[in-house]
Image: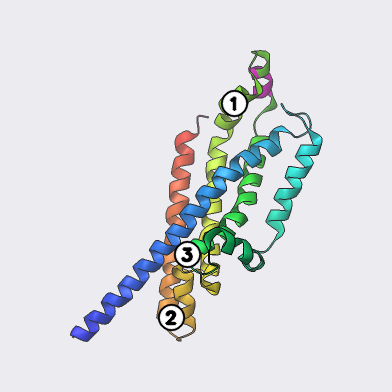
Amino acid sequence: MTELLTRLSRYNQLMLAGINETLYMVGFSLLIAVIIGLPLGFLTAITRKGHIMENTPVHKVLDLVINIGRSVPFIILMVAVIPLTRVIVGTSIGTTAAIVPLALAAIPFVGRIVDNALQEVSPGVIEAAQAMGATPLQIVFKVLFSESLPAIILGITLTAINLIGYSAMAGAIGGGGLGDIAIRYGYQRFKVGIMIETVIILVILVQLVQWLGNLLAKRFDHR
């Protein structure tokens, strides 16, 4: 009986550690992606032809960067940036190391989401702000950001959900988290129950993130 309780305790600790590692990877990579991807998306949108800070060369460069970033499959990106990960983190294995490719994968995704969200803002609202003498900076923060915030929140929610899936793939190269548990303890040791449980936990995490994102988007939707 004591041996069974000991095994269950170790098993629960393993799952809790996997959840914590997954949340750690997703949380920090999402934060980095938002910090960099948000201004990237805004610059891409406002430098578009006919927008408030039209600059075709800059727009084309930023648009190309986003497209290239979104075109690279994550599994290839993880391997390709191993040297960069070692320079930044000091190692290419572990949860902290996995944040580097996760963030790099999410930055262009956030950038494109923000760019698309800003394109949905009515030109009439922007023209009204310009007619009132608003500066480009004021239009960005008080008009564009305010009007597109619900769509941006939903886009960031989608990014977080994708990162949860990516974090599971990161387990394939020693990234830790639930994906690592599913591979090492579920697949390699033929314990189907562990694989099923990790999938269930990932599904629950996705549902919680989506619920929270919908709630926040509704909260900031002033329409």
Q: Earlier in the sequence, mark 2 or mark 1?
A: 1
Crowd tier of the residue under label 3, counting other residues whose Cα lies within 10 Å: few below 14, some 14–19, many 20 or above: many
Residue located beneath label 3 in the image: 95
Cα–Cα gap, marks 1 and 3: 39 Å
Q: Earlier in the sequence, mark 2 or mark 3?
A: 3
Cα–Cα gap, marks 2 and 3: 17 Å
Q: Nearer the viewer, residue 82 or 34?
A: 82
Residue found 66% across the figure and 67% down from its top: 76
Q: Is residue 182 left or right of residue 85?
A: left
Q: Secondary structure at mark 3?
A: helix
Q: Quick check: 213 above or below 200?
A: above
Q: Nearer the viewer, residue 88 or 165?
A: 88
Instruction: Single out the residue that lies furthest toward the top.
Output: 132
Residue flagged by tag 2: what amino acid is it? Answer: Tyr
Look at the image and give the residue range highlighted in magenta: 124-129
Residue located beneath label 2 in the image: 185
Residue flagged by tag 3: what amino acid is it? Answer: Thr
In the image, which is nearer the foreground, mark 1 or mark 3? 3
Tell me if I can see residue 74 in this picture: no
Q: Position of residue 71 (x, y in %)?
A: 71, 58
Q: Secondary structure at mark 2?
A: helix
Residue located beneath label 1 in the image: 143
In the image, which is nearer the foreground, mark 2 or mark 1? 2
Tell me if I can see residue 104 in this picture: yes
Q: Is residue 11 left or right of residue 51?
A: left
Cα–Cα gap, marks 2 and 1: 51 Å
